[in-house]
Image: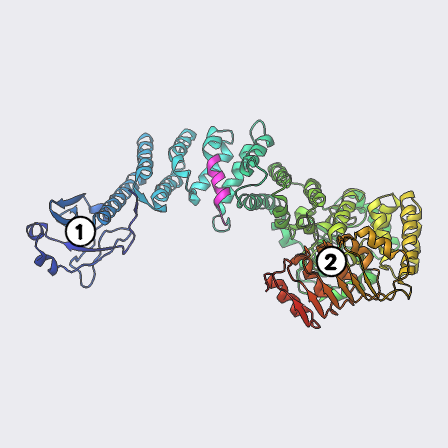
Amino acid sequence: MRYKLLQEGDIQVCVIRHPRTFLSKILTSKFLRRWEPHHLTLADNSVASATPTGYMENSISYSAIEDVQLLSWENAPKYCLQLTIPGGTVLLQAANSYLRDQWFHSLQWKKKIYKYKKVLSNPSRWEVVLKEIRTLVDMALTSPLQDDSIHQAPLEIVSKLLSENNNLTTQDHESIIVAIAPLLENNHPPPDLCEFFCKHCRERPRSMVVIEVFTPVVQRILKHNMDFGKCPRLRLFTQEYILSLNELNAGMEVVKKFIHSMHGPTGQCPHPRVLPNLVAVCLAAIYSCYEEFINSRDNSPSLKEIRNGCQQQCDRKPNLPLRLLHTSPDLVSQEATLTESRLKPVIVTSNEIHVEVERNNTANQKMTASVGNDSEPNLIDCLMVSPTCSTMSIELSTQADRILGCYVEILKMLSDYDDWRPALASLLQPIPFPKEALAHEKFTKELKYVIQRFAEDPRQEVHSCLLSVRAGKDGWFQLYSPGGVACDDDGELFASMVHILMGSCYKTKKFLLSLAENKLGPCMLLALRGNQTMVEILCLMLEYNIIDNNDTQLQIISTLESTDVGKRMYEQLCERQRELKELQRKGGPTRLTLPSKSTDADLARLLSSGSFGNLENLSLAFTNVTSACAEHLIKLPSLKQLNLWSTQFGDAGLRLLSEHLTMLQVLNLCETPVTDAGLLALSSMKSLCSLNMNSTKLSADTYEDLKAKLPNLKEVDVRYTEAW
């Protein structure tokens, strides 16, 4: 039978100070009525403490208890404990046998724990100490009490013993670790014990104790830990354990097997806390590699000072943008040759970072709007570099370089698991690494594999994490774009990211505007080299009238016509534009209903057959059209009413409509597969007066959001939805 360990204030008993008198009268109810129950307090160092109305004048310490016995009498339902103390005996009467046994085991446990604390506080012979530790562990494992402290108390005793005795041999260390191993199967080690384990991992990484004892302990930490912030030494122990695995002969292969064991053999990891804990360990380890550089920030401009162009903390010149440079002599000589054509730059030097401040009137005007902004500076702006220089000169120590390599490889491993990739992408957004790491060429080059995996994943929750979380806060897309500090190729990764983002980004027009404003040069360069994705981007910019400047438009057209793929796509664009002009030419019907079972191809064929510039009401109800038909619907300039009842029109099409058909007034989405992801995009269609979302996957929160953002909405049907 299992019992709960008694805590302070748990016992309500009759306390009898004179057992001989009590034993002679215990069977008489008259005597018991004279002894009213009072509160017996269990403190950390005593069994009973005095109360104002009690019978015990002094508390009884656990160390003073010489013996604890169970008392019972035949034919008398009295349940008592007898405590033998110097100078007398105390009897405790319980209400039933279970409560009496609970008291008995709790008192026995407390008494023995204080004994072991005393014995192990002054060790003399370590063979005796080791024997006592084993006995203590056995007692904890066989105790009928159920409480976290039953296993934690022995671990804390051993932890204190180890912290106070630093002269132990390696063999003593391993013997103690093996002795307490059974207690670690279901309990986290206390902080001091974690520190001892870390030391052992560093000094003896190839010890069998690391594999046989520490492995299940670390596995339990990764599966069950909820917050490393509350127990940082658990994270440090996990970090050192993984590094010790990397020191084995097989190196990263052993680490890879460990990561696989944490994930499990199936396609879905059954432990949701494993990935966040592994990522937390990786981030902390990588941060530690650059800690020396981060600590040197006291002698270098802060992020805000870099953004504001300060030369020193006490000398602020807010209108001067600056760039981080290599310390390479070649670059210094190159910069020197440029001084003839412009003002000489002012170099601000710290131990690790060299900052060039340019006095440039154009740049000054551009930065004026952001000078007075006290918000967090843009990370990529802080790391903007000259065309001939992409990273700071950072040299890590051998140990830091080994740690960095190990944990970046682990991030790569994590990105290879399909079920972990969405959560990993979310955990790495916004960018969680220090700016020193992002300016380190080796780090960004190795991390590029992870970003590539995100860019290849077709799931929107993965590749959407490449973008920044909010305006003014750059993300991985900006970091690995041409001109970004991490871009070390000719734009292949950039093109891959653009391709996947264009395929799912519901704000396509806004995304194109962003590219045209910030990345038009790289897009044109890649298109000139025949990159099909960039050719498509330039064609879309022309088709959606993203570019206003005529000279820029002509330059884009020249770029498209310089390659075979660009010429072909531009000709197709021109043909579509001619068809669009014919389609949008005034004339044709004002109302149109497609026959049942019509497809996307049927709709495209119909719209290409004449002019539909006057079409205001289009019904596609009960047809087989999908989101693909949205590309044709957005070309109808006068469309005000659209019926998509019982079609396969989904979120992707709804996002496209919301960008282009802003004048739509009536929309019927009844019995379509749209979800909150697409319905939220309708908030930009301010002209909507009537909206039917009957039998869709609309949630109550999305419905409330739409009502707040659509001021003209008068008729809404949300029957058979969560919002109903």
Image coordinates for residue 664, horizontal then vertical, percent? 77, 66
Outermost residue, top side: 249
Please give the residue where the numbered disc 2 appears in the rendered image. 655
Residue beneath disc 1 = 92
Please report the bounds of the magenta region as a residue range. 215-226
Is residue 336 among the parts visible in the rendering?
Answer: no
Question: Count of labels shown?
Answer: 2
Q: Position of residue 56 (x, y in %)?
A: 17, 57
Q: Label 1 is placed on what type of residue?
A: Leu
Residue drawn at (63%, 53%) of the image: 297
Viewer-nearest of labels 2 and 1?
2
Return the x and y of residue 278 as percentages of the image width and height.
56, 43
454 or 488, which lies in front? 454
Task: Give the quarter of the image for residue 543.
Answer: bottom right
Dot 1 lies on which element?
strand
**What secondary structure is the stretch in magenta mostly built from?**
helix
